[in-house]
Amino acid sequence: MNTNEVARLLGVSASTIQRWVKQLELPMERNERGHYHFNNEDIDLLKNIQTQIQNGTLLQEIAPVQERKTRKGTVKAAPENNSELERLYSIVTELETKVNSKADSVASYQLLQHRREIEELQSQVIKLTKQVENLQSQLQEFKTSNLPDKPLVLDQGKLNRKKKNFVSSLFGFLG
Protein backbone atom coordinates (compact mmCIF):
# COMPACT_ATOMS: atom_id res chain seq x y z
CA MET A 1 0.00 0.00 0.00
CA ASN A 2 1.13 3.54 -0.57
CA THR A 3 1.04 6.39 1.97
CA ASN A 4 -2.38 7.73 0.93
CA GLU A 5 -4.01 4.31 1.15
CA VAL A 6 -2.58 3.67 4.62
CA ALA A 7 -3.65 7.17 5.72
CA ARG A 8 -7.22 6.48 4.60
CA LEU A 9 -7.18 3.09 6.33
CA LEU A 10 -6.07 4.67 9.64
CA GLY A 11 -8.19 7.80 9.25
CA VAL A 12 -5.27 10.23 9.35
CA SER A 13 -3.55 12.42 6.77
CA ALA A 14 -0.72 11.25 4.56
CA SER A 15 1.55 13.85 6.14
CA THR A 16 0.83 12.29 9.56
CA ILE A 17 1.98 8.89 8.29
CA GLN A 18 5.12 10.47 6.83
CA ARG A 19 5.81 12.32 10.10
CA TRP A 20 5.50 9.09 12.13
CA VAL A 21 7.90 7.28 9.79
CA LYS A 22 10.47 10.09 9.89
CA GLN A 23 10.30 10.98 13.58
CA LEU A 24 10.31 7.38 14.75
CA GLU A 25 12.88 6.45 12.11
CA LEU A 26 10.81 3.49 10.96
CA PRO A 27 12.63 1.31 8.42
CA MET A 28 10.07 1.51 5.62
CA GLU A 29 10.60 0.24 2.11
CA ARG A 30 10.57 2.82 -0.68
CA ASN A 31 9.83 2.44 -4.36
CA GLU A 32 12.04 3.68 -7.20
CA ARG A 33 10.56 7.19 -6.84
CA GLY A 34 11.32 7.32 -3.12
CA HIS A 35 7.68 6.88 -2.03
CA TYR A 36 6.95 4.67 0.96
CA HIS A 37 5.53 1.22 0.35
CA PHE A 38 3.81 -0.41 3.34
CA ASN A 39 3.22 -4.11 3.85
CA ASN A 40 0.88 -5.71 6.43
CA GLU A 41 3.60 -5.75 9.11
CA ASP A 42 4.17 -2.00 8.57
CA ILE A 43 0.45 -1.29 8.79
CA ASP A 44 0.19 -3.21 12.07
CA LEU A 45 3.10 -1.19 13.43
CA LEU A 46 1.41 2.09 12.37
CA LYS A 47 -1.86 0.96 13.97
CA ASN A 48 0.04 0.28 17.20
CA ILE A 49 1.58 3.78 17.05
CA GLN A 50 -1.83 5.30 16.42
CA THR A 51 -3.29 3.45 19.42
CA GLN A 52 -0.49 4.69 21.66
CA ILE A 53 -1.03 8.28 20.50
CA GLN A 54 -4.80 7.99 21.05
CA ASN A 55 -4.10 6.75 24.58
CA GLY A 56 -2.17 9.94 25.31
CA THR A 57 1.39 8.93 24.57
CA LEU A 58 3.40 11.67 22.89
CA LEU A 59 5.08 10.77 19.64
CA GLN A 60 8.47 11.58 21.18
CA GLU A 61 7.77 9.10 24.00
CA ILE A 62 7.06 6.16 21.70
CA ALA A 63 9.98 3.77 21.84
CA PRO A 64 11.98 3.56 18.63
CA VAL A 65 11.36 0.44 16.65
CA GLN A 66 13.90 -2.33 16.98
CA GLU A 67 15.89 -2.80 13.81
CA ARG A 68 14.20 -5.38 11.70
CA LYS A 69 15.79 -7.70 9.24
CA THR A 70 17.08 -6.04 6.11
CA ARG A 71 14.28 -5.63 3.65
CA LYS A 72 14.60 -6.22 -0.02
CA GLY A 73 15.22 -3.12 -2.06
CA THR A 74 16.61 -1.12 0.86
CA VAL A 75 20.28 -1.94 0.33
CA LYS A 76 21.95 -1.52 -3.01
CA ALA A 77 24.89 -3.67 -4.02
CA ALA A 78 28.19 -1.91 -3.61
CA PRO A 79 30.06 -1.05 -6.80
CA GLU A 80 32.69 -3.57 -7.68
CA ASN A 81 35.58 -1.15 -7.98
CA ASN A 82 36.63 2.34 -7.03
CA SER A 83 36.66 3.61 -10.61
CA GLU A 84 32.90 3.15 -10.79
CA LEU A 85 32.52 4.99 -7.48
CA GLU A 86 34.72 7.81 -8.72
CA ARG A 87 32.69 8.05 -11.94
CA LEU A 88 29.44 8.22 -9.96
CA TYR A 89 30.94 10.81 -7.64
CA SER A 90 32.02 12.98 -10.58
CA ILE A 91 28.53 12.71 -12.12
CA VAL A 92 26.92 13.70 -8.82
CA THR A 93 29.36 16.60 -8.43
CA GLU A 94 28.63 17.80 -11.97
CA LEU A 95 24.88 17.57 -11.36
CA GLU A 96 25.22 19.50 -8.10
CA THR A 97 27.14 22.22 -9.92
CA LYS A 98 24.45 22.42 -12.61
CA VAL A 99 21.67 22.54 -10.02
CA ASN A 100 23.46 25.29 -8.07
CA SER A 101 24.03 27.25 -11.28
CA LYS A 102 20.39 26.88 -12.26
CA ALA A 103 19.27 27.90 -8.77
CA ASP A 104 21.50 31.00 -8.99
CA SER A 105 20.02 31.85 -12.39
CA VAL A 106 16.48 31.46 -11.11
CA ALA A 107 17.23 33.56 -8.03
CA SER A 108 18.80 36.28 -10.20
CA TYR A 109 15.80 36.29 -12.53
CA GLN A 110 13.42 36.53 -9.58
CA LEU A 111 15.42 39.40 -8.08
CA LEU A 112 15.33 41.28 -11.38
CA GLN A 113 11.59 40.67 -11.69
CA HIS A 114 11.02 41.91 -8.13
CA ARG A 115 13.16 44.97 -8.84
CA ARG A 116 11.02 45.80 -11.91
CA GLU A 117 7.85 45.40 -9.87
CA ILE A 118 9.23 47.64 -7.12
CA GLU A 119 10.23 50.29 -9.66
CA GLU A 120 6.72 50.20 -11.16
CA LEU A 121 5.20 50.57 -7.69
CA GLN A 122 7.53 53.45 -6.88
CA SER A 123 6.49 55.16 -10.12
CA GLN A 124 2.83 54.74 -9.19
CA VAL A 125 3.50 56.12 -5.71
CA ILE A 126 5.16 59.20 -7.23
CA LYS A 127 2.19 59.75 -9.57
CA LEU A 128 -0.28 59.34 -6.70
CA THR A 129 1.73 61.71 -4.52
CA LYS A 130 1.63 64.37 -7.26
CA GLN A 131 -2.13 63.87 -7.64
CA VAL A 132 -2.67 64.21 -3.89
CA GLU A 133 -0.53 67.38 -3.80
CA ASN A 134 -2.51 68.78 -6.73
CA LEU A 135 -5.82 67.99 -5.03
CA GLN A 136 -4.60 69.53 -1.77
CA SER A 137 -3.58 72.73 -3.54
CA GLN A 138 -6.97 72.88 -5.30
CA LEU A 139 -8.71 72.39 -1.97
CA GLN A 140 -6.62 75.14 -0.40
CA GLU A 141 -7.48 77.49 -3.29
CA PHE A 142 -11.14 76.66 -2.90
CA LYS A 143 -11.04 77.37 0.84
CA THR A 144 -9.27 80.70 0.41
CA SER A 145 -11.44 81.98 -2.47
CA ASN A 146 -13.92 84.79 -1.71
CA LEU A 147 -17.00 83.05 -0.44
CA PRO A 148 -19.99 84.99 0.91
CA ASP A 149 -20.19 85.23 4.70
CA LYS A 150 -23.60 83.59 4.83
CA PRO A 151 -24.08 80.22 3.23
CA LEU A 152 -26.54 80.09 0.37
CA VAL A 153 -29.54 78.08 1.42
CA LEU A 154 -32.12 77.33 -1.18
CA ASP A 155 -34.63 76.16 1.35
CA GLN A 156 -35.05 79.67 2.87
CA GLY A 157 -37.66 80.61 0.29
CA LYS A 158 -39.77 77.60 1.19
CA LEU A 159 -39.55 78.41 4.88
CA ASN A 160 -40.75 81.95 4.29
CA ARG A 161 -43.71 80.71 2.24
CA LYS A 162 -44.65 78.29 4.97
CA LYS A 163 -44.54 81.08 7.53
CA LYS A 164 -46.70 83.29 5.30
CA ASN A 165 -49.20 80.49 4.74
CA PHE A 166 -49.38 79.82 8.47
CA VAL A 167 -49.89 83.53 9.30
CA SER A 168 -52.50 83.95 6.56
CA SER A 169 -54.34 80.89 7.80
CA LEU A 170 -54.49 82.44 11.26
CA PHE A 171 -55.86 85.71 9.96
CA GLY A 172 -57.68 84.28 6.99
CA PHE A 173 -61.04 84.54 8.73
CA LEU A 174 -60.74 88.36 8.72
CA GLY A 175 -60.64 88.74 4.99
Image: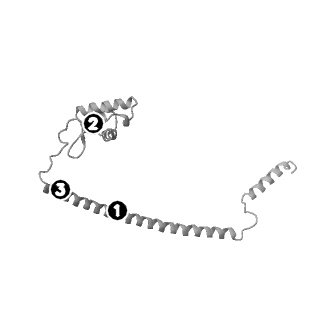
Of tags 1 and 2, which is closer to the observer?
1
Q: Position of residue 44 (x, y in %)?
A: 27, 30
Q: Residues within 10 Å of mark 3 (few under 14, many from 20)?
A: few
At 66% from the left and 68% from the top, the residue drawn is: 142
Q: Secondary structure at mark 2?
A: helix
Q: Secondary structure at mark 3?
A: helix
Q: Earlier in the sequence, mark 3 or mark 1?
A: 3
Q: Which residue is mark 2?
A: 5
> Given the image, on which type of amino acid does mark 3 rest?
Leu
Q: Position of residue 7 (x, y in %)?
A: 31, 36
Confirm or deny contact between disc 3 and disc 1 (CB under 8 A).
Answer: no
Left or right for 135, reference 39: right
Q: Earlier in the sequence, mark 1 or mark 2?
A: 2
Confirm or deny contact between disc 3 and disc 2 (CB under 8 A).
Answer: no
Checking the image for residue 107, the label placed there is: 1
At 71% from the left and 71% from the top, the residue drawn is: 146
Instruction: Report the quarter where the N terminus lies.
Output: top left
> Given the image, on which type of amino acid does mark 1 rest?
Ala
Checking the image for residue 88, the label placed there is: 3
